[in-house]
Amino acid sequence: MKRVLITLTTISTLAIPLGAQETVDLAMIERIKAEGLERSKVMEHFNYLTNVVGPRLSATPAYKRAADWGVLRFEEWGLENAHLESWDFGRGWTLEGLTLEMRSPRYFPR
């Protein structure tokens, strides 16, 4: 009797998750994969942000250009209420020049 009770409990416990399984929409998965692999604009966006806008830190003109570009893209894609949130950051700075010199093991100017 005890063995029958354990067997029935085990079977009923294992059967519960089977009813909760969701069917997989393979067509939707294929559409998502096709969108990401065939129609992705990620390299265009990457190229613009790195080569046109360039390096950017918070509170710099380059950051503002990149943020405005992002808002414009969102609006083009049909997102409503795309806007920037203002917040206090303090002063920003922009690196306009850099000089490196190797001092060890022997001096080497740039």
Image: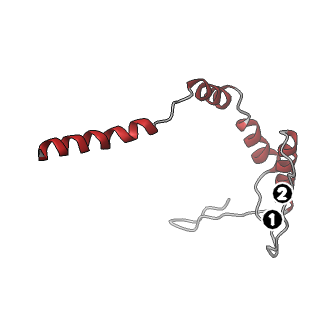
Q: Position of residue 16 (x, y in %)?
A: 37, 41
Disc 1 element = loop
Mark carried by residue 54? none
**Within-10-Å neighbours for mark 2: few <14, some 14–19, many 20+:** some
Which amino acid is tagged 1?
Answer: Thr
Instruction: Note whether 36 is above or below 53 in the view shown.
Output: above
Return the x and y of residue 46 as percentages of the image width and height: 73, 42
Residue labelled with disc 1: 94
The residue that label 2 is drawn on is 62
Quadrant position of residue 93: bottom right
Residue at 81 percent of width and 76 percent of height: 90
- Distance, label 2 to label 1, CA atoms, is 9 Å
Circle 2 — which element?
helix
x 87%, y 61%: residue? 61
Q: Is residue 84 left or right of residue 4?
A: right
Disc 2 marks a residue whose amino acid type is Ala
Q: Nearer the viewer, residue 22 or 57?
A: 22
In the image, residue 63 lies at what x, y percent?
A: 81, 58
Q: Nearer the viewer, residue 73 or 4?
A: 4
Name the image quarter holding the N terminus: top left
Quarter of the figure that contains the C terminus: bottom right
Q: Is residue 2 left or right of residue 36?
A: left
Mark 1, other Cα within 10 Å: few <14 / some 14–19 / many ≥20: few
* Residue drawn where x is 31% and y is 44% of the image: 13
Find out whether the residues at labels 2 and 1 contact each other: C-beta distance under 8 Å.
yes
- In depth, the one of 23 and 72 nearer the eye is 23
Taking 99 as reference, is 14 left or right? Answer: left
